[in-house]
Amino acid sequence: MMQKNYKIGELAKLFKISTDTLRFYEKEGLLIPKRESNGYRMYSIFDIWKLNVISTMKSLGVELKDIKVFLNDRSVQKEKEILELELDYLEDKIKHLEYQKIELTNRLNLLNDATNNTTYNEVQIEVLQNRKIIYLDYEFTNDNEIDLAFSSLSQRFDDIIYFFNRDFGMILPLEKVLIGKYNEYRRGFLIVDDNMEKYDTTIDAGKYLIFRHRGPYENIDIAYSKILAFAKSNNLELSSEVIERYLIDRNQTSRPDEYLTEIQIAVLNE
């Protein structure tokens, strides 16, 4: 049979919360227990109902001030308003979880493709579709600044950037590549899902030279020499911008032999 009254420690244990939390609710006027002659707080069955309401509403994102209003002035209309707020909160949460699911799936597919694709160190010509990106204009000179760029992107778009969304890359001028300056990046970018409404711009669809370099970035000069030689031998006119897409980098592995950098350069002539 349920007790009629509970001491603060008993109630805290029952709800698996701290006594400090119960004292905080009391301070905020949400849950005010009766006091015995010895000063001990005693919580009634009605207080337990209130605590259930507080716990449920908090888990649904309702603010304490709104919970307090409901508890102190309950009505059918107010409960309807609270339920509508809860439904809005759940819809937002479901939408966010769906986006996270998409990003996890995309990242897993990208890693599977990166590890199963055997076209390394070979120049490929592929037709790519438009890709939505968010970007950061910055002058980059080393890997640490690349990581800083990704962190900045995450902060600027904290509502859509998820930890596992690492379809990240850099844009650098072709003129720098031609003179062997492979670390003078122009802009960092993150490819986002086609369904995303919030983005900066797109990478144009078109025909691209693709080269996947397996191994440390220090050897990227070998990759560029091959892709430029291929373009020259085939009389291809190239875009003035080079895209480096980091499929696997030090954020995914501590083994440099597993690094995978994809170089993309748009072809301007047929």
Image (spheres, rainbow, N blue to C red):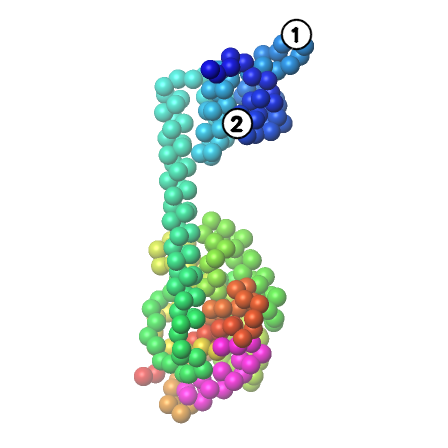
Q: Relative to residue 62, is residue 28 depicted above or below?
A: above
N-terminal label among 1 and 2? 2
State the separation of the CA atoms marked 1 and 2.
Answer: 25 Å
Q: Which residue has dot 2 on it?
A: 15
Front-most of residues 177 and 63? 63
**Which three-letter amino acid code belongs to the residue tagged 1?**
Ser
User: Is residue 241 at least partly visible in the picture?
Assistant: no
Front-most of residues 2 and 213? 2
Q: Is residue 56 left or right of residue 182?
A: left
Q: Secondary structure at mark 2?
A: helix
Q: Relative to residue 29, is residue 84 depicted above or below?
A: below
Q: What numbered label is drawn on residue 242?
A: none
Q: Dot 1: within a 10 Å radius of its alpha carbon, few (fewer than 14), some, or many (20 or more) residues?
A: few
Q: What numbered label is drawn on residue 37?
A: 1
Quadrant where the C terminus sits is bottom left
Q: Secondary structure at mark 1?
A: loop
Locate residue 132, reporting x and y percent.
Answer: 39, 62
Name which residue lies at 58% across and 78% down.
218
User: Is residue 216 at least partly visible in the picture?
Assistant: yes
Q: Is residue 137 left or right of residue 232?
A: right
Quarter of the view holding residue 113: bottom left
Q: Are marks 1 and 2 in contact (CB under 8 Å)?
A: no
Q: Which stretch did the figure color magenta?
A: 214-231
Front-most of residues 133 and 24? 24
Locate residue 102, reporting x and y percent.
Answer: 38, 55
Locate residue 123, reporting x and y percent.
Answer: 41, 83
Locate residue 22, reporting x and y percent.
Answer: 59, 24
Name which residue lies at 57% across and 26% down.
13
Quarter of the view holding residue 185: bottom right
In the picture as drawn, the residue positioned furthest to the front comes out as: 1
Taking the magenta stretch, the answer to whether it contains residue 58 is no
